[in-house]
């Protein structure tokens, strides 16, 4: 079913929007099936799980880290991670930069913003992000590159609220782009939208959607 599910999701997404197949908790066999169906971008939220999968799966996969990243786990993914979606503190960004220096890499990152009403969600406020981006300390970081923003809407059936929160994230992106990244072509990504709301996110300007259950089915919590 994974191949069929992927095909269905792909048909519902514009060609300019990147599909991140959220494979967290899924066994390697499921990822291989998606890979064989042409999928090359996978999203994981546990560093050790992502490292272990990277070791056994094809090396042309683009690995996106989409979960809350602990600083003591950064070292496990820095050698190969394509994009970290979830930079929610300056300390974390500095820690990623420090580890990237060791591997002579520049790691692409997104700033995660708290746009939902749920307190359980991680993320920066616009004010906190501007404090980071305007600081001299940030300008000294040579091994990370901020490529855009990420956020999650409230887990609700209220489409008006979801659309409002996605719209707010797009406004944050526009503000930061204008103030800090006007001439940077790489600052272009808005990571928003999951299985239940990615169509709304695309309507509000998402450039990449993180879709898991619509591809792989429900999560396997025992892994």
Image (tube, grey):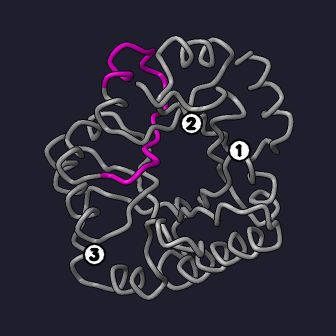
Q: Residue 26, image x and y in percent?
A: 50, 24
Lower position in the chain sequence, tag 1 or tag 2: 2
- Residue 137's tag is none
Q: Are marks 1 and 2 in contact (CB under 8 Å)?
A: yes
Q: Residue at x 48, y 33 (%)?
A: 24
Residues in magenta, as a range:
52-69
Q: Residue 177, image x and y in percent?
A: 56, 76
Q: CA distance from mark 1 to mark 2?
A: 9 Å
Helix, strand or loop under label 3: helix
Q: CA distance from mark 1 to mark 3?
A: 36 Å
Q: Which residue is mark 2?
A: 22
Q: Which residue is mark 1?
A: 195
Q: How many marks?
A: 3
Q: Residue 189, image x and y in percent?
A: 59, 59
Q: Which residue is mark 3?
A: 139
Q: Are marks 3 and 2 in contact (CB under 8 Å)?
A: no
Of tags 3 and 2, the one toward the viewer is 2
Lower position in the chain sequence, tag 3 or tag 2: 2
Q: Are marks 1 and 3 in contact (CB under 8 Å)?
A: no
Lower position in the chain sequence, tag 1 or tag 3: 3
* Residue 136 included in the magenta stretch of the image: no
């Amino acid at each position: 079913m994974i191949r069929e599910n992927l095909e269905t999701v792909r048909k519902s997404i514009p060609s300019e929007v990147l599909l991140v197949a959220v494979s967290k908790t899924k066994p390697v066999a499921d990822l291989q099936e998606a890979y064989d169906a042409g999928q090359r971008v996978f999203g994981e939220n546990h560093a050790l799980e992502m490292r272990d999968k990277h070791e056994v799966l094809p090396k042309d996969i683009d690995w996106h880290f989409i979960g809350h990243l602990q600083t003591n786990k950064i070292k496990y993914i820095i050698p190969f991670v394509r994009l970290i979606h979830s930079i929610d503190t300056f300390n974390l960004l500095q820690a990623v930069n420090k580890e990237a220096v060791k591997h002579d890499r520049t790691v692409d990152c997104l700033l995660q913003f708290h746009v939902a009403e749920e307190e359980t969600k991680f993320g920066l406020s616009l004010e906190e992000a501007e404090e980071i981006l305007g600081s001299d300390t940030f300008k000294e970081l040579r091994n990370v590159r901020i490529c855009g923003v990420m956020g999650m809407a409230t887990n609700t059936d209220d489409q008006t609220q979801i659309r409002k929160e996605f719209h707010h994230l797009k406004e944050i992106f526009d503000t930061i782009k204008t103030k800090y990244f006007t001439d940077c072509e790489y600052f272009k990504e808005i990571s928003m939208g999951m299985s239940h709301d990615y169509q709304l996110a695309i309507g509000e300007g998402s450039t990449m959607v993180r879709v898991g259950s619509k591809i792989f089915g429900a999560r396997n919590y025992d892994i």
